[in-house]
Amino acid sequence: MIFMKRIGYGVVKLWAYMQAILPFWLLYVKSDVVCFIVYHIVRYRRRVVRSNLLNSFPDKDEKEIKKIEKRFYRNLCDLVFEVCKILTQDSDRLAKRVTFKNSEVVQSLYDRNKSLFVALPHSGNWEWFGKLMHRFTQHKVSAIYKRVENPAFDAFMLDIRTNYHIDMEQMIESRTAFRELVKRKDYCNICFIVADQSPRGVESDYWTEFLHQDTCWFTGMERMAKSLDYAVVFVEMNRVGRGRYEVCFKQITDQPINTETGYITEQYARMIERFVNENPDNWLWSHRRWKHKRA
């Protein structure tokens, strides 16, 4: 089993490295070819994506929906190849492709010795964001991740996320997140979290209307923020060109203890909703986001 895992990991990393050594212009030519195959031939999750778009934008006609759909698949393929680039791009070169517009929002929290969660939905290139966090903050950097079922791919993603400037200790598996952050209570922390996945559909989930649909949300980030007294900052990462991104920070609260239950999660949902309405092809529509129904 361990041998097969190592073989799988080696194959995945070799393929990724072969993409990473290509110049960006050639990488995007390759992405266009893969996008054609994925969209027209393999038809990867086409029904899921189309259903999500139709339900989320009932005011748009079929032509508009199809335009968003095609742009989403191109962005998705670009994202896969861009993540591979982390293997050959140091943070200086990567930083030239990402503009942080108002990082003083984060700096002001550090100046007050305030730890925080930076909450980014599945938009832009969240892997690049995680690799560049140390460039806009003096906080002790960490990130919460969820283990991938495929062991070879999980090992590869963990390797990419820790291949420079972030050590293994600072990657926190989601099931142990609260315990690990409690251990770091003496530090001024910034913790990166992606929290727009579909939860398990349990009683503790938070429900609200989102993109014209009854939607449940994880409450883990809110509960941890209240328990640890972490500020919560929303991250807008917008694609402004192929391999080019702009990041904008928007504070949800710096006093989580004083907020009503559900406030942080509700504001997070509203901010994602506004972002998606303004940048509809920049979100991960292939997720089965609405697979649960409220009891």
Image (cartoon, rainbow, N blue to C red):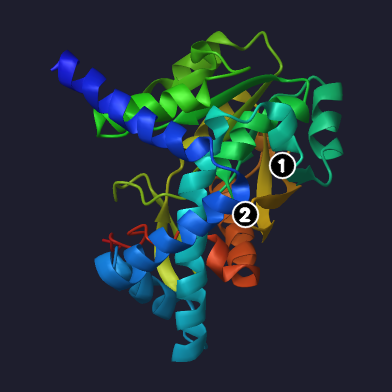
Give the residue number, with chain letter if any, for mark 2.
267
Quadrant of residue 164 in the image? Answer: top right
Q: Residue at x 81, y 24 (%)?
A: 110
User: Local crowd at mark 1 within 10 Å, few (<14), some, or many (≥20)?
Assistant: some
Q: Is residue 254 left or right of residue 70?
A: right
Contact (Cβ within 8 Å) of mark 2 with mark 1:
yes
Image quadrant in which the N terminus is located: top left
Of residues 252 and 7, the one drawn nearer to the viewer in this rendering = 7
In the image, what residue type sits under mark 2?
Gln
Total marks in image:
2
Amino acid under disc 1: Thr
Q: Earlier in the sequence, mark 2 or mark 1?
A: 1
Nearer-the-camera pick, 46 or 54: 46
Q: How far apart in space, not on screen, are marks 2 and 1 (Cα)?
A: 9 Å
Residue receiving disc 1 = 253
Among the 4 quarters of the image, the one containing residue 207? bottom left
Q: Position of residue 250 (x, y in %)?
A: 74, 48
Which x, y percent locates residue 198?
Answer: 37, 52
**How far across and down, in percent of the image, does residue 122 sit?**
51, 50
Q: Residue at 69%, 52% (x, y): give it.
A: 244
